[in-house]
Image (cartoon, helix red, strand yellow):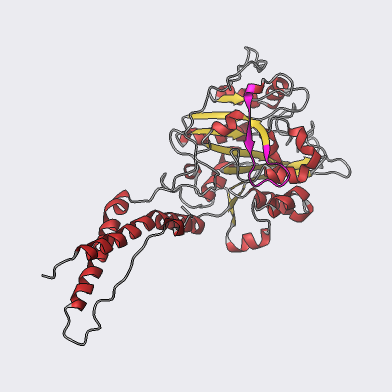
Amino acid sequence: MTKLSRRDFLVGCTRLAAGSMLLPWLRQQSVHAADAQEFPKVSVAEGTNDDTAAQILQTALDGLGGIKRFVKPGQTVAVKPNATWAYPPNTASSTDPDFLTAVIQAVQDAGAARIIVMDHCSIEPGASDALRISGIGKVVKNMGVEGVFPDRYNAPKSMYTKIDLPHGRANQTIGVIKAATEADIRINLAVAKTHNVTKFTMCLKHMMGFLQQPGLLHAGLEQGIADINTPSLIQPQLHILEAIRVRIPYGNYRVCAGPETDLTNPNVVTRRNTILAGIDPVLIDAYGCVHFFDIQPQELTHLLRAYESGCGEMDVEAALADGRIRRFIVGAPVPAEPAATHTAVVESPQISSAKPTAVFIPELNPIGEPASMGNVNCLPATEQLVAASPLLNTALIPAAAAVTGLSLILLKRMRANLPKGDPGEVHQSVQTDPSSKDQHG
């Protein structure tokens, strides 16, 4: 048997170590590739008047890979509806109560340990009336989840914290609802509707509800909206656009909210029975521009700024052609929900190990009125990419790498013992440079 020198043994170990160092990155890249191949960036679910909000939502989520792709057992989830306006359901002013109930139910079914529903009620008459009249306060109570709805006048400063926007162009820091930063997962629930300042509001604009002082963003509104959609501690892992009813412009009448419904004034509120779910808010809003409002995405200035800031894509036609946007009909077959270990690929600036602090829970009085705001004692965790087979990761692949390294050593020794004429052993210097290691992991 050929004797193995100390030098050859060390060379083989170095090769084995180098191979092992690459394994996490290779595993991560395979999950990224599988995720990109299996699921679109945006799932569009289209129903009819006979379909419930829960059915349309389920179709949208299934088309995207299922809620368990995003929410894991034991996590804290922040759900951000539109709870600003004191108008009743079916007016496309605030989030539909049935739709919100369906979202909360889906998150509960996925095993979330804690759900916090939140929005900054920055418009008169304030949080209590908005929660009562919109029906959102009743949903929060009936579903047994927590609620954080800062009132523009009564909310204590302890409800807020300041975060960095490292990729912001006009804003590098900003005040936000603290509970949003303490959640593992954030789900942004926007309503497709007109807006008297930005023309239209969907997922991108809806992020302003996380802010401590949304009005301060209006000095440079379009770029400000883009900035708060760049990677930060409030970046959602999932965006859902509610277009069951859509508020549309009617002549010069273009407002954020009102008493009209699709039955009382179909010129202002139209029934679309559609829900979009996705990981690209720019692409979701771009689809809304084309299919709900009959404009090109670049006509919406804050959407264009978000695209220019790298927040997503806006070529709807190309995305439909190559499958980045997929459309599904309620009741038609959709992809099966993946195993819980198949996680969403969502960029996040850092991993948080902090435990969420106590958050205000809204109480409703016996007649269904949301209680007045009281004092409260008030980081996203990056989804860890888990390989499908731990046994393969921890045993078979390293073993194969070890066999390969030792085989190379033995081959070299065999060459050294060949008859005269063999060129002899080639001396190699193997070095590992940590600075050159791929950083994608």
Residue sitting at the far left: 1
Q: Could you say which is closer to the camera, residue 16 or residue 37?
A: 16
Q: At which x and y percent is residue 219? A: 80, 39
Tally of numbered tags: 0
Q: Residue furthest bottom?
A: 421
Residue 296 in view, yes or no: no
- Residue 212 in which image quadrant: top right
Residue drawn at x 56%, y 36% as measured from the top left: 103
Q: Quadrant of the N terminus?
A: bottom left
Q: Which residue occupies the foreground of this view, 303 or 265? A: 303
Q: Which residues are magenta?
A: 158-173
Locate residue 132, reporting x and y percent. 69, 22
Would residue 9 be visible to someone looking at this image?
A: yes
- Residue 48 sits inside the magenta stretch: no
**Residue found at x 64% / y 42%:** 165
On the picture, is 431 further left or further right than 358?
A: left
Q: Residue furthest right?
A: 252
In the displayed structure, does residue 132 sit left or right of residue 199? Answer: left
Query: Is residue 172 found inside the magenta-colored segment of the image?
Result: yes
Percent x, y for residue 12? 26, 63
